[in-house]
Amino acid sequence: MTQSQEIGSRMKKQRELLGLTREQLAEKLDITPRFCYDLELGLKGMSVSTLSKLLEPA
């Protein structure tokens, strides 16, 4: 498993634990739901800006 895949897997698990849909998380991060999907699969990497938004408290 690559580092991007590991991050994506953790991101998906946390999203599900929080009860968020992919669309809701994408809106919070100001990205498209498709890009969110790609991040969760480890197909794409995220910018520092997106990572920062992801780490902000709900």
Image: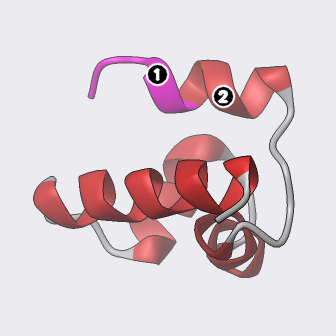
Residue 41 in percent (x, y) is at 65, 76
Residue 43 in percent (x, y) is at 82, 72
**Magenta extent:** 54-58
Q: Crowding near pointer 2: few (<14 within 10 Å), some, many (20+)?
A: few
Give the residue at mark 1.
Answer: 55
Secondary structure of residue under mark 2: helix
For image coordinates 27% across by 51% down, the residue present is 14
- Decide if residue 10 is on the left or right side of residue 43: left
- Decide if residue 35 is on the left or right side of residue 55: right
For image coordinates 69% across by 63% down, the residue present is 39
The image shows residue 2, relative to residue 48, as above or below, that is: below
The quarter of the picture where the C terminus appears is top left
The image shows residue 7, relative to residue 55, as above or below, that is: below
Between 48 and 27, the residue placed more toward the observer is: 48
Disc on res. 51: 2
Secondary structure of residue under mark 1: helix
